[in-house]
Image (spheres, rainbow, N blue to C red):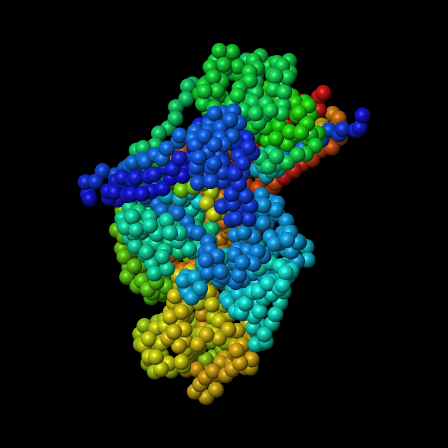
């Protein structure tokens, strides 16, 4: 439902009644075919929201070229006709589909649902009202989102970086960080937006790709690149791309006379006043909750934090203060794409927990008539040529194509449709298939990438195998790209139809592969992530095996006292352990490790071996890897020789026990990044800055007389944690920045510990006498991670953490189907992110486990045993390990070999087909014969 | 008449074929001599296909993936 | 509360990457999903981005 907003939610968890207001679109979605004729004729231009005001759109428009649904809409506020009845109305006149409806009205829907998930997102901070750094006055001061559009090939300048003021090519760009973040004076947003450091680096790197020799400088306070592989990217940006990083506060941005150049003033690290000139200044704007979302939160009666984000618990990060209403994404705090995606899945898991008893109650399975066997029939091809309104017919002589198609071999029926994809045409095609006894279909229309699924359904509805259709893409690849040469386009359309007909002639009925699923889960690791995941799956109704290497549940969380938001960890972990132990769907295997794995998605068999050597085989449909991480044991800073140099975990224990040395000590020094962000461990452990700041606050609160120092490289109290950083400074904690090349030195001098560090304010080495030094040590991956990875054929990255399928969009999936990752095993992270990822892993696993079988696409590698001689060339090239070599014939017989394809693992890429020298393996639907026929047809004129 | 080459292009469904679709959406204009054959991965393109195309009169073959 | 009849459908408010992920996972595991989006098309903020870290993949 687009153009729709929730206005009211009544009822209780499990049974809500939601009022949704749908604004008029003024375009009939059923009729609009997104040809764009309306927009072309529309005389009214306004700023495009999508292009963040850098480009224009019409009053009738699609949000962006690849929008879903790809349907036009009229912006009533700027439409001439809607503002003044009787005027304009050009769009209505040119719309062949008759989709324009100026009388469209607002609709109100009352919808009954079991749960509500809020994912309304964020808005970027608007620097205009406050005139931050001359934004809105100087044309060449733009926001990062605007730069994003300038850099985009689909943006207003098609990716050319030019100055808005005069169109001059840009040679020097400055990025100013923390605009609308970490700044309560100018914008009122005290928190850190978390994502701006990273996107500024990315934009700088990409801008340099676009403009060779471009100078880019990023002016920042702390470089917060705490995400997975972010620090490596930062180093590459510095070393390889040559992006310049300047740690400073900007004093001013002014125009330099009429030229449009911008003068930047700042104080550099040596305390000198510097003036530099730039062609363009980019403001790295932060994220905030939009006003309409605040109103929504108010209507829904859910609590917000001081920073105006939805309030959640660290142990239930997607649960709002109102039962049955969940959050995910930036509404619950600024976050990046992978974390948002994780929370999307996590919210799904939480909903499935609530609504487990009514799963499948409102969903239905479509039924189709029985399929006709055509294997003994001669081909009878039907060709349907789409006009696509005027999109195709306006360029291609469709009548000529129709006449030509009729002359092709085996073509027995040809017809033209105004819109082949419309509902009525679909029904008509079904009728024709039956009436004309067609057994192969060519649809000459648009792209199979979007429409092949639709036409496959049409064939199924007609009782024909869904794979007996081939599309000729005479729109995207023809009429749209050769619109200035209709004659050539018509000739090409004929070729494309001929090629499609040739291919489909050799098409076969293919059966989608169906694999049964063992509806049980396996979770490896009994820490917070593993337990959360197991508990959620169990509450969703699935049997779960939980495997823990040690004899206790709880993992690393057993060492923690408080989350960043102040929740008491031991209480929460104890509750969690209790729930896990008492859940009768969870089978716990303590002191056990996975030693062997067999099978594939839906059908894994994992061998779990105990300390006693007893092995059990567990059958499961999906698995979650949550084996956690280890604390780094330091050797630096004389940790081994000075007793009062301790790790953060040790300090927490001593502090908790009110140990007398800690109790009496007056001078504390925290050293950050011990074992993180250097040489072989170029990653941030993410939790240590916040942890040290929290400890420092506790020390200061206990005794304000204490001197507490934190020696840091970049203070990464990201998102709403920034409040802690602020509190610590207020309490008088002293923060001293050091660089990797100037690490602090720790020595013992009599009863004191001497810490020497370079002071960037005083520009000389500083000696700090301390009673205790606390090392913020790194989080390391488990040593046996890679071995476990090999068993499940899932990879670990260069640092030893498990590698997800896609850094942005599949953050909990492995590239091996049916396996998921959560918690520290994936990357260092705080409790609430581990919990969210664990819930997400359960949601992803449940998409499999909720089904009794998986149906897979029939486009798979198939062995032709007549030709395959078992040379096994294909075995190595298969990226999915789907091919294995087997002995043919009775065991012990003269070893003739052949290959075997595991269809559940095969993705149909056909690397085997491209490699096989003997035609021993082919991909169904793309056989050698079919493609050869296509080649021949392409060249036969 | 000037020489009009015939080009056969093998395009991967997931990238180059999609790119060709987008070229259409963006209404980019390009020469009409190319005939695209959709494959599920450019790795599927057997060397024989390239030979086939050339021997049957193609002036050029593109494998895009 | 205990005798409330539960309903097997869910409403997702917001059609960005987060909302879409939640919608897909719920639909794939047996729930009827209403995806409510304020603007004319789903996609959210990510659709505005040119490329994304780390592979500089196109965000579409």
Residue A387 lies in quadrant: top right
- Image quadrant holding the N terminus of chain A, namely top left
Q: Residue at x 51, y 49 (%)?
A: A52
| Residue A10 visible here | yes
Residue A363 lies in quadrant: top left
In the rendered view, would you say A37 is above or below A677?
above
Q: How many marks?
A: 0
- The one nearer the camera, A674 or A630, is A674
- The one nearer the camera, B29 or A498, is B29
Q: Residue at x 26, y 51 (%)?
A: A582
Residue A187 percent across, percent down from the top left: 43, 61
In the rendered view, would you say A141 is above or below B35?
below
In the rendered view, would you say A904 is above or below A413?
below
Q: Residue at x 40, y 30 (%)?
A: A103
Residue A245 percent across, percent down from the top left: 58, 65
- The one nearer the camera, A741 or A514, is A741
| Residue A828 visible here | no
In the rendered view, would you say A817 is above or below A673?
above
- Image quadrant holding the C terminus of chain A, namely top right
**On the picture, is A934 further left or further right than A297?**
right
Q: Residue at x 57, y 42 (%)?
A: A879
Residue A220 percent across, percent down from the top left: 53, 65
Residue furthest to the right in view is B1
């Amino acid at each position: 439902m687009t153009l729709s907003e929730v206005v009211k939610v009544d009822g209780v968890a499990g049974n809500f009644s939601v009022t949704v207001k749908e604004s008029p679109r003024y375009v009939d979605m059923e009729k609009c075919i997104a040809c764009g004729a309306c927009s072309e004729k529309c005389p009214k231009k306004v700023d495009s929201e999508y292009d963040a005001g850098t480009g224009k759109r019409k009053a009738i428009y699609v949000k962006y070229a690849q929008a879903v649904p790809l349907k036009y809409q009229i912006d009533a506020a700027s439409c001439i006709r809607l503002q003044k009845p009787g005027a304009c109305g050009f769009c209505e006149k040119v719309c062949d589909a008759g989709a324009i409806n100026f009388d469209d009205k607002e609709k109100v829907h009352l919808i009954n649902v079991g749960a509500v998930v809020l994912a309304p997102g964020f808005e970027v901070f608007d620097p205009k009202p406050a005139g931050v750094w001359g934004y809105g006055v100087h044309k060449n001061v733009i926001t990062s989102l605007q730069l994003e559009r300038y850099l985009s090939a689909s943006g207003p300048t098609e990716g050319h970086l030019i100055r808005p003021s005069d169109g001059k090519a840009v040679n020097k760009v400055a990025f100013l960080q923390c605009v609308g973040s970490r700044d309560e004076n100018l914008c009122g947003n005290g928190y850190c937006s978390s994502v701006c450091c990273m996107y500024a680096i990315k934009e700088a790197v990409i801008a340099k790709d676009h403009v060779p020799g471009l100078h880019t400088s990023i002016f920042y306070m702390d470089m917060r690149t705490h995400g997975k592989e972010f620090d490596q990217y930062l180093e590459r940006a510095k070393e390889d791309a040559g992006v310049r990083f300047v740690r400073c506060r900007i004093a001013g941005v002014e125009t330099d006379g009429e030229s449009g150049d911008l003068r930047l003033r700042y104080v550099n690290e040596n305390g000198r006043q510097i003036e530099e000139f730039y062609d363009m200044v980019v403001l790295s704007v932060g994220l905030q909750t939009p006003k309409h979302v605040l109103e929504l939160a108010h209507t829904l009666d859910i609590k917000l934090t001081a920073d105006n984000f939805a309030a959640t618990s660290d142990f239930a990060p997607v649960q709002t203060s109102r039962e049955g209403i969940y959050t995910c994404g930036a509404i619950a705090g600024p976050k990046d794409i992978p974390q948002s995606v994780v929370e999307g899945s996590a919210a799904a898991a939480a909903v499935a927990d609530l609504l487990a008893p009514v799963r499948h109650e409102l969903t239905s399975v479509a039924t189709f008539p029985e399929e006709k066997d055509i294997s003994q029939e001669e081909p009878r091809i039907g060709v349907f040529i789409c006009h696509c309104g005027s999109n195709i017919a306006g360029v291609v002589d469709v009548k000529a194509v129709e006449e030509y198609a009729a002359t092709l071999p085996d073509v027995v029926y040809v017809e033209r449709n105004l819109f082949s994809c419309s509902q009525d045409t679909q029904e008509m095609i079904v009728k024709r298939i039956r009436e004309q006894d067609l057994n192969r279909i060519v649809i000459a229309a648009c792209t199979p990438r979007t429409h092949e699924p639709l036409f496959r359904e049409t064939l199924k509805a007609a009782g024909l195998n869904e794979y007996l259709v081939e599309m000729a893409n005479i729109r995207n690849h023809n009429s749209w790209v050769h619109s200035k040469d209709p004659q050539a386009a018509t000739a090409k359309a004929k070729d494309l139809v001929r090629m499609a007909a040739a291919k489909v002639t050799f098409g076969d009925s293919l059966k989608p592969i169906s694999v049964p699923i063992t509806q049980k889960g396996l979770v490896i690791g009994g820490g917070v992530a593993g337990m959360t995941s197991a508990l959620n799956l169990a509450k969703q109704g699935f049997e779960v095996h939980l495997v823990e290497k040690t004899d206790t549940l709880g993992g690393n969380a057993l060492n923690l006292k408080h989350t960043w938001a102040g929740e008491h960890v031991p209480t929460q972990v104890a509750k969690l352990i209790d729930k896990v132990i008492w859940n009768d769907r969870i089978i716990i295997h303590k002191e056990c490790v996975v030693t062997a794995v067999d099978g594939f998605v839906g059908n894994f068999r994992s061998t779990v071996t105990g300390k006693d050597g007893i092995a059990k085989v567990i059958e499961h449909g999906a698995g979650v890897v949550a084996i956690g991480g280890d604390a780094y044991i330091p050797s630096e800073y004389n940790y081994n020789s000075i007793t009062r140099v301790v790790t953060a975990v040790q300090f927490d224990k001593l502090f908790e026990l009110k140990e007398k040395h800690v109790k009496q000590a007056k001078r504390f020094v925290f050293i950050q990044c011990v074992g993180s962000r250097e040489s072989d461990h170029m990653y941030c452990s993410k939790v240590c800055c916040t942890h040290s700041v929290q400890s420092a606050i506790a020390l200061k609160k206990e005794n304000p007389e204490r001197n507490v120092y934190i020696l840091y490289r970049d203070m990464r109290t990201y998102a709403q944690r920034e409040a802690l950083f602020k509190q610590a400074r207020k309490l008088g904690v002293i923060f001293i920045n050091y660089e990797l090349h100037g690490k602090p030195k720790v020595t013992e001098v009599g009863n004191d510990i001497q810490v020497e560090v370079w002071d960037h304010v005083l520009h000389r080495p500083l000696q700090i006498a301390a009673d205790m030094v606390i090392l913020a040590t790194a989080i390391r991956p488990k040593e046996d991670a890679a071995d476990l990875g090999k068993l499940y054929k899932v990879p670990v990255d260069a640092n030893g953490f498990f590698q997800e399928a896609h850094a942005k969009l599949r953050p909990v999936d492995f590239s091996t189907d049916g396996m998921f990752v959560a918690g520290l095993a994936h990357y260092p992270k705080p409790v609430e992110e581990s919990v969210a990822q664990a819930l997400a892993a359960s949601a992803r696993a449940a998409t499999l486990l909720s089904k009794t079988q998986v149906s897979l696409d029939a486009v798979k590698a198939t062995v032709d045993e007549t030709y395959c001689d078992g040379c096994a060339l294909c075995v190595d090239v298969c990226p999915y390990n789907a091919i294995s070599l087997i002995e043919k014939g009775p065991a012990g017989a003269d070893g003739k070999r052949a290959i075997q394809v595991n269809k559940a693992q095969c993705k149909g890429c056909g690397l085997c087909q491209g490699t096989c020298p003997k035609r021993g393996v082919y991909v169904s639907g793309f056989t050698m014969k079919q493609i050869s026929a296509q080649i021949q047809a392409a060249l036969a004129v | 008449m000037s020489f009009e080459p015939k080009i056969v292009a093998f395009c991967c469904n997931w990238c180059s074929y999609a790119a060709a679709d987008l070229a259409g959406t963006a209404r980019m204009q390009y020469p009409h001599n190319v005939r695209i054959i959709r494959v599920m991965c450019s790795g599927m393109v057997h060397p024989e296909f390239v030979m086939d195309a050339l021997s049957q009169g193609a002036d050029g073959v593109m494998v895009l993936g | 509360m205990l005798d409330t009849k539960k309903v097997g459908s869910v409403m997702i408010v917001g059609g960005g990457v987060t909302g879409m992920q939640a919608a897909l996972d719920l639909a794939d595991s047996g729930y009827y999903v209403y995806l409510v989006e304020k603007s004319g098309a789903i996609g959210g903020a990510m659709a505005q981005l040119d490329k994304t870290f780390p592979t500089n993949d196109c965000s579409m």
